[in-house]
Image (cartoon, grey):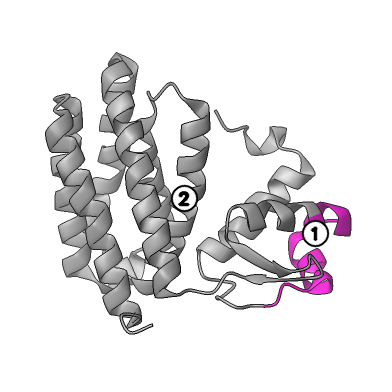
Amino acid sequence: MPKKNSQQSPIELCHKQLQNLIVSGTLPAGTLLEMPPLKKELSATQDSIEKVLSMLVCQRLVETKNYQEFYVTPITKAYIQDAYNSFLAVEMATVEQSIAHGDRAWRERIKKSFDALTPFLNVQKESFSSSLWATCNYNFHESLVAACPWPTLLHIRQNLWYQTDRYLRCAVDMASSPEIFAQKHNEHIQITQAVLNRDVKEAVALMTFHIMDNMRIILERLKLNNI
């Protein structure tokens, strides 16, 4: 279980901040990550930031030239396809394991996290918080795999999640895309039912469509099909 903010080390807090800036698109693809502005933005030491940058390189959110220059990983068709196909493979394994090992508390967590997404259907565009929706969406998908007993697999999954979520958030503003938002919510309903029914075959089929359709939408929106 992740530590609460009050228990996180300076490096953990710095990592979370910089990761969020990249995944949310606040720091666009290709941005050169220079030390002086990062120290000011993150209120962190150079040593902490250097360690965090190395961590983000491992997550493929940052790229580097000989560990002298760091920049936000570019968005390309190849990167998107790699992230989504890798995430699909890992997600199928974690979902199957979670269904096999999930208990009553796991089921209640899924219901609670799904219920947190539902109110967004009635939020007007001007009041819609894309960042809050992204957090609730993350919590929902985390709940589905929470009963998987393999920490290493979950760690790999989490790193891939941030890659795929970055591409989705850069390509689609849910507040301005009501048809996509409604479609994804309906997919969440079906996935929730299949997982709670422990129907592995149906859950895998629905999740496969959900993930790969996100990739299709991103490629169309970013017009990267010819890259």
Instruction: Look at the numbered disc 2 and give the secondary structure of its residue.
Output: helix
- Tag count in the figure? 2
Q: Quadrant of residue 133?
A: bottom left
Q: Earlier in the sequence, mark 2 or mark 1?
A: 1
The span shown in magenta is 32-50
- Disc 2 to disc 1, C-alpha distance: 27 Å
- Position of 79 relative to 165 (above/below): below
Q: Could you tell me which secondary element the residue under label 1 belongs to?
A: loop
Position of residue 136 relative to residue 170, above or below, is above
Judge left or right: residue 140 versus residue 14. Answer: left
Q: Amino acid at mark 2?
A: Leu
Residue 128's disc number: none
Q: Quadrant of the N terminus?
A: top right
Would residue 197 appear left or right of 218 to someone viewing this image? left
- Residue visible at 76% across and 39% down? 9
Q: Nearer the viewer, mark 2 or mark 1?
A: 2
Front residue of 106 and 54: 54
- Residue at 60% x, 57% y: name it: 19
Q: Position of residue 18 (x, y in %)?
A: 65, 59
The amino acid type of the residue labelled 1 equals Ser
Q: Is residue 4 magenta?
A: no
Q: Quadrant of the C terminus?
A: bottom left
Q: Residue at x 33, y 27 (%)?
A: 109
Query: Mark 2 touching mark 1, by CB under 8 A?
Result: no
The x, y position of residue 210, in whole percent, is 22, 53
Q: Main secondary structure of the magenta part?
A: helix
- The mark found on residue 160 in the picture is 2
Task: Decide if residue 214 is on the left or right side of residue 33.
Answer: left
Identify residue for label 1. 43
Q: Position of residue 163 (x, y in %)?
A: 48, 58
